Structures are given as C-alpha cells and as structure tokens.
Image (tube, rainbow, N blue to C red):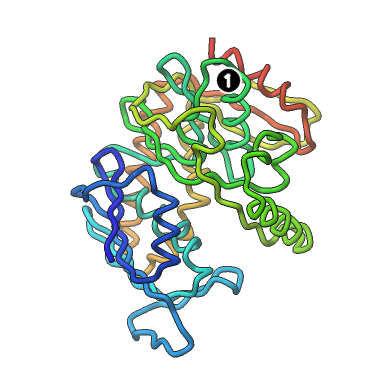
C-alpha cells in the first residue's frame, strides 16, 4: 500500500508498506498533509521484522535504547531520498524522527526552504518563532500563548518551514505530551482520552525511574489541543526567540547578537540532524554532507539578518506560566 503526503506543493513524503501499525502511525501523524506527490520526495519502504525475517547483506543494522531495532539502506539524490527499512513495531516512531523528518529537512534546502526545530504562533497576520533544544519549552510556550493572549493562534508546535524571504509555513504533525508538562498546561489533561491519560502516567513513571534516560511521548492530534483549526497559509515572520535554560532565578528576555543567531539556530537543528548524518555515512560523501550544512547555514544567515532576534532565558526550576506570557506579550503588540 502506498500513501502520499505533501507539504505546500514543494516536497512530499511517500510511504510504501503493508504493515498496519506503520500505516496507522503515519496517517495519524500527517493527517493534515494528504496530497499528491511533489517533485522532491522522501520515500520510505517499511517492512515489519519478524523472528524469521532475513536482513539483506546491504542493509545496516541499528537500534535506539535497545528497544527499537531496525535495519536500513538509504539512497540520496538532490530531488529524492529513498529509505528502505526492516524493523520491529517500536522502530516505527524512531525511524520517523531519526530518518524521515531529517530527510524532509534536507530536500527543501535545494529550493531555499528549511525546516526549523521551532514552534510558530501567529498574531494579526505575522508569526513569532520559538526555537530551542528539545525540552526547552517550545510546545509549552506556544500553547500557553495561544490559550492566554486573544488573537494568538498556533501555526506549528515543534517544527516549521521557513524561507529566505522571512516567511513561515506550517508543518503539521501530532503534538508530543509528557506528564511533566501538565502543571503548565492544565487544559491539556482534559483533552486526553482515559487511555491516553493512563499512557501519560505510565511513561512518566518510566521517565522518572530511568533517571530521565527513557522519554516517550503520548502523541495527540494537534487540533485537539489548539484553540482553533491549524493554520495553513504562509506568514511573514515578525520575530525569532531563542529559548535557553539557565541557572538564574528569574526570567530574562533580551536582544540576541545577530552575528551569532544563525549559528545558534543551526546548532539547535544539528542536535536532531546529526544522528541522521551518522546513519547516512555510507550514502553521503563528506563533501555532500558539508554542502547540505552550508546551504542550511546560508539560509539561516539570510533569515536572522532580516529579523529581530531575542533570547529568552528560562530558569531550570518551575516558574509561573503567567510570568512567561507577560514577558513575551510585548512581542505581539
């Protein structure tokens, strides 16, 4: 069975699989992006591994935290990335995060488009991007702003397309919830089904008992938590906010150094992208790898030179969510 998902008619993802779990996962993840193939395509051929499955000799074996196990091969051209994978059920979301999403990041760079590890909220026809490392608070802040400030809506909660003309385009996928976010987002708990609430508590206990080594989200359709239907239009970017954790006791928002902003954003992206480059070691030459990174950095430099960029320093301890909203609200005036 083949399923097609398209992003703004620029790039598409094609899934070929007979595995019901893989079909259900990607259908739920990219429900809002169903469409016809675009010229630039990432294609995943997935087969479920069984105890009797044989692994072709040209496949590379790998795993994630011992539980998710798969073997793969990758073929990369400027307009197409083909991923062939044989894995267990737990490998499906890991293949998505470590292979499919980074591949979708590579191809649009040829068209002058990048995917940032960032949330985006819109207000009066423009957007504010919130970027930071995993766990910095992108999704939490986006939800807080949308549910607190009148007129603010979520365009994307974890990844967003941007182009060299400083416009943002939504990337819609399911939201990732963790139990430690609920004190900041009390309204989120009421949006979960009883089974989702049980899964949230279970994975929260696993996270604590593993000393934060195992982190597994409960995936929830975005429209169930957003206060309106997801936005689909391209939007001019009003500002970029870099989220950083610090040991200070209070919140601090200040202008960022424009000369360092592009490298900071690329470093944030690299934390997700580098594992994919490792998996592609046999498919990309060092020169090709460097070429992709240089294209991304050049695009981010153009972007950050056009925008006001701020750094929001967040204490490591819990702070009042309303303090954060009050600090960021001037950006929406």
Q: Up-down: is 153 above or below 42?
A: above
Between 28 and 48, the one lying in front of the other is 28
Q: Name the spot of residue 145 as percent of width and height, x first.
A: 60, 24
Q: Residue at x 54, y 44 (%)?
A: 175
Residue reaching furthest to the front = 194
Q: Residue at x 45, y 78 (%)?
A: 61
Q: Is residue 144 left or right of residue 16?
A: right
Residue reaching furthest to the bottom = 52
Q: Up-down: is 316 above or below 74?
A: above
Residue placed under numbered mark 1 in the picture:
255
Q: Name the spot of residue 194 as percent of width and height, x first.
A: 67, 51
Q: Name the spot of residue 88 as percent of width and height, x first.
A: 49, 75
Task: Give residue 253's quadrant in the image.
Answer: top right
Q: Is residue 233 visible?
A: yes
Q: Is residue 11 left or right of residue 256?
A: left
Q: Is residue 267 visible?
A: no
Between 145 and 225, the one lying in front of the other is 225
Q: Residue at x 51, y 32 (%)?
A: 260
Task: Give residue 333's quadrant in the image.
Answer: top right
């Amino acid at each position: 069975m083949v399923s097609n998902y398209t992003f703004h008619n620029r790039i598409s993802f094609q899934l070929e699989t007979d595995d019901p779990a893989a079909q259900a996962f990607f259908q739920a993840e990219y429900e809002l992006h169903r469409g016809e193939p675009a010229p630039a395509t990432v294609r995943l051929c997935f087969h479920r591994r069984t105890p009797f499955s044989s692994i072709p000799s040209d496949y590379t074996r790998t795993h994630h935290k011992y539980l998710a196990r798969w073997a793969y091969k990758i073929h990369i051209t400027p307009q197409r990335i083909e991923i062939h994978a044989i894995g267990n059920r737990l490998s499906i979301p890991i293949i998505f995060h470590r292979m499919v999403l980074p591949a979708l990041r590579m191809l649009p760079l040829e068209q002058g488009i990048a995917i940032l590890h960032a949330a985006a909220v819109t207000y009066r026809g423009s957007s504010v991007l919130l970027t930071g490392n995993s766990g910095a608070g992108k999704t939490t802040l986006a939800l807080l702003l949308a549910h607190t400030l009148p007129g603010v809506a979520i365009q994307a909660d974890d990844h967003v397309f941007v182009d060299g003309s400083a416009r943002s385009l939504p990337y819609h996928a399911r939201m990732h919830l963790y139990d430690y976010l609920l004190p900041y987002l009390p309204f989120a708990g009421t949006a979960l089904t009883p089974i989702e609430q049980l899964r949230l508590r279970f994975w929260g206990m696993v996270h604590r008992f593993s000393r934060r080594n195992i982190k597994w989200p409960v995936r929830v359709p975005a429209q169930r938590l957003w206060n309106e239907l997801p936005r689909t239009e391209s939007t001019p970017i009003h500002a970029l906010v870099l989220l950083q954790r610090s040991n200070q006791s209070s919140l601090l928002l200040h202008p960022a150094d424009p000369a360092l902003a592009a490298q900071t954003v690329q470093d944030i992206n690299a934390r997700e992208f580098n594992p994919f480059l490792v998996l592609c070691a046999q498919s990309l030459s060092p020169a090709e790898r460097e070429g992709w990174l240089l294209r991304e950095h050049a695009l981010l430099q153009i972007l950050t030179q056009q925008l006001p960029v701020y750094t929001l320093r967040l204490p490591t301890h819990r702070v009042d969510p309303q303090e954060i909203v009050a600090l960021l609200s001037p950006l929406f005036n």
